[in-house]
Amino acid sequence: MIEAAIRTIEQHFAGERFMSHRDYWNFYSAGRIVFGSGIVRRLAQFLEPWKPKRILLVSDAILAKFQIVDQVKAPLEAAGISVTIFDGGEPEPSFKTADAAIEVARGAKPDVIVGVGGGSNLDLAKIVATVLTHGGSYRDYFGFGKVPGPIIPLVCIPTTAGTGSEVSHAAVLTDTEDQTKISSLSHYLRPVLAVVDPKLTLTCPPRASADSGIDALTHAIEAYTAVHYHELDVPADEPFPYDGKQPIGDCLAERAIELVGKHLVTAVNEPQNLAAREGMALAATLAGLAFSNNAVALVHALEYPIGGALHCSHGAGNGLLLPYVMRFNLPSRLPEFARIAELLGADTKGLSTEAAAELAITQVEALRSPIGIPPRIRDLGGTRDQLPVFARKSFGIKRLMLLNGRCPTEQDLLEILEAAY
């Protein structure tokens, strides 16, 4: 692990150019990350620095049914903390759901907000915390850097292994009228505490495990193949939500890719395999740290309108698009793709960099197939006449165009979508 990290940093700085747009990079994280199987029972202990008296717990009805919510609530109530539960969370949360959660939060007047669930619930908790702290509407915080200051202490407890929202600076809501997803991005959205308990993922069903797991892989690959920080076409001191490819993010992305390759299929097919669940939980958190510093890029830009229109999960949409975007990015990222192939288990000995890089795409496709990720847009119910609309909306997300390792045109996006159709 240490040798790999040193090699990554040495490769990163080889041929460094210091007369370019950015001559430094940053790294951000959650305030504290606690990782371990069964540790949710010690949640009250981890919350001691904030001495909460009232907590709002943001989750959903399914997790309440499977008593995951009770597992989180019990140690809090045992410590004398009053807990109000909002269990109206939903996949890809809508504005309506955000409004309902905010209304409950205003009545609860919490000292701390705890998000429990997949990325959708954690994102919803971030939105609620922001509005509760700063007022107004969640619409006021769409985009980057719109949150004016720290938010009420936010704790995120993932029950899926995929989004990395427990450590990221992003929150996504779905505009059902415009049929697209809209992000709020701010480093103030990073939780003060992430509690990653792999045992909480044991009840995650195979479909959700597959979608979230391929999402983690997408995060890691996009982070690893993003534009280099010193080539990012943004003035050095201009605020921007991501830094581009940088060495700490690269180290984390490499390990996340390796873990997904080793554990994803097992976690989906053997849900009670704790070793696989632990591997995927770690992969998701590492990938979350990687992408929320380096970048997400073209896969995410294309998925936002597709997911909004076709109502697929974020992970399924990303997993579908990933190999097609990799094919587009391949010419500009040959060494990175060759390394990805190795990390995913391909035998690249004796191969040219070009041949090894091709295997990265093959490995991703082989990983998708046994876990049921749909391979085509038409498998999600999409139609060919929707593709130009998807391309236009995606191309409008300029920050993700800038962050991609190969700069695309709108026509390039359309051709990627046609290949994926």
Image: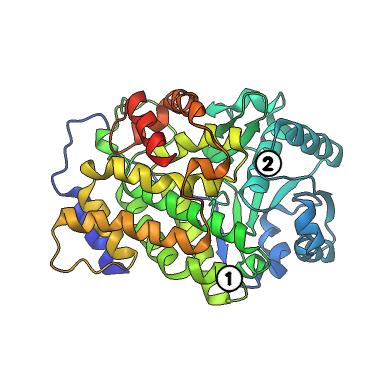
Callout count: 2
Callout 1: helix, strand or loop? Answer: loop
| Residue drawn 37% across the image and 48% down it | 323
Residue 200 image-quadrant placement: bottom right
Of circles 2 and 1, the one toward us is 2
Labelled disc at residue 362: none
| Residue drawn 78% across the image and 38% down it | 101
Q: Residues within 10 Å of mark 2 (few under 14, many from 20)?
A: many
Residue type, mark 1 in image: Gly
**Mark 1 = which residue?**
36
| Residue drawn 72% across the image and 45% down it | 90
Instruction: Determine whether, in the image, residue 241 is placed left or right of residue 109.
Output: left
Residue 410 image-quadrant placement: top left
Residue type, mark 2 in image: Leu
Labelled disc at residue 124: 2
Quarter of the rendering occupied by the N terminus: bottom left
Callout 2: helix, strand or loop? Answer: helix
Residue 311 image-quadrant placement: top right
- Residue 292 seen in the figure: no
Q: Earlier in the sequence, mark 2 or mark 1?
A: 1
Q: Residue 287 at x, y = what percent?
A: 45, 54
Q: CA distance from mark 2 to mark 1?
A: 24 Å
Quarter of the rendering occupied by the C terminus: top left
Instruction: Determine whether, in the image, residue 26 is placed left or right of residue 204.
Output: left
Q: Residue 189 at x, y = what percent?
A: 58, 40
Q: Residue 95 at x, y = what percent?
A: 71, 31
